[in-house]
Image (tube, helix red, strand yellow):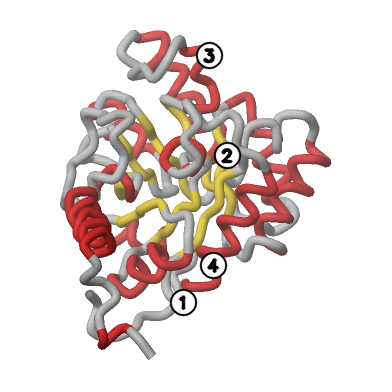
Amino acid sequence: MSETPKKRTTILDLQSMKSNGEKIAVLTAYDYPFARIMDLAGIDVILVGDSVGSVVAGYDNTLPVTMDEMTYHTRAVARSVTQALVVADMPFLSYQIDLSEARRNAGRLIKEGGAQAVKLEGGVNVAETIRAIVAMDVPVVAHIGLTPQSIHRMGGFRVQGRQEAQANQLLADARAVADAGACAVVLEGIPADLAGKITTELTIPTIGIGAGINCDGQVLVIHDILGLCEKYSPKFVKRYADVSGTIRQGIDDYIREVKDGTFPGPEHSF
């Protein structure tokens, strides 16, 4: 845990971190308690991801997540954070219909949710959308490579960029989102060498997830690194704690004490 509070991280700080060679640490959060713990620990960026659909709501993928759900979870996270940069995912169908709707929904995540930036998926195909949102002074984090909102087109959660044509498209996507004004770009599920090439070429920070060590930063889902998600275990995830086992033990002890009448004791009664 950080000993002294630091000032609020901004998109300008992320740019400086890239320039200085300082790695950027990013984790997802979806509620007040987890976000507060991360913030006190000194995390640079908290991503309120639409992964909430999979790890909290139990959906098979991120597609069912709504704007109202993202606004709710973003607001809960933002209430607890004083140091980290809060980035909120724009869910499926919140930015694909037209530019006016994309701008409105991005604005909602800032105004109602309390985020400092939004994230959306896509490359060349969303450059105009990124440009439109940035024009209203809302910072945008781009997301290319394995984009979960495109799983039906990709045929599942598959590594992208192994073939030359795919790699060239990802390079074009990276250039397009940077040129459109994105303040950073998430590189997901792409070969490490390609991620390194993109990172070297771009002036904006790259945040990797399953994209190797050469990115400017890394992001993982908090439930994955704490052993709280049993639905899947991607190769790129490292488990740093087994919180699930600790929680299960506490619940088992509670049930036993209720059943055998040892809880509540005198010290828990009025």
Regarding residue 103, the answer to whether it shows in the image is yes
Amino acid at dot 1? Thr
Q: Residue at x 42, y 74 (%)?
A: 83
Residue at left offset 33%, top offset 40%: 208
Q: Tag count in the figure?
A: 4
Mark 3, other Cα within 10 Å: few <14 / some 14–19 / many ≥20: few
Q: Residues within 10 Å of mark 1 (few under 14, many from 20)?
A: some
Q: Residue furthest right?
A: 100
- What amino acid does circle 3 point to? His
Residue beneath disc 3: 152
In the rendered image, is residue 219 in sight? Answer: no
Reading the chain from its start, which is encountered first: label 3 or label 1?
A: 1
Near mark 4 (Cα within 10 A), the count class, few <14, some 14-19 or many ≥20, is many
Q: Secondary structure at mark 2?
A: strand
Disc 1: which residue: 82
Can you say whether 51 is above or below 75 in the image?
Answer: above
Rendering coords of residue 42 (x, y %)? 31, 70
Between marks 2 and 4 in the image, the one whose residue lies nearer the viewer: 4
Tags 4 and 1 touching, CB below 8 Å: no
Q: Nearer the viewer, mark 2 or mark 3?
A: 3
The quarter of the rendered structure image containing the C terminus is: bottom left
Residue type at tag 4: Ala
- In the rendered image, residue 115, in percent from the top left (x then y), is placed at 59, 61
Please tell me whether mark 1 sits on a helix, a strand or a loop.
Answer: loop
Along the polypeptide, which appears first: circle 2 or circle 3?
2
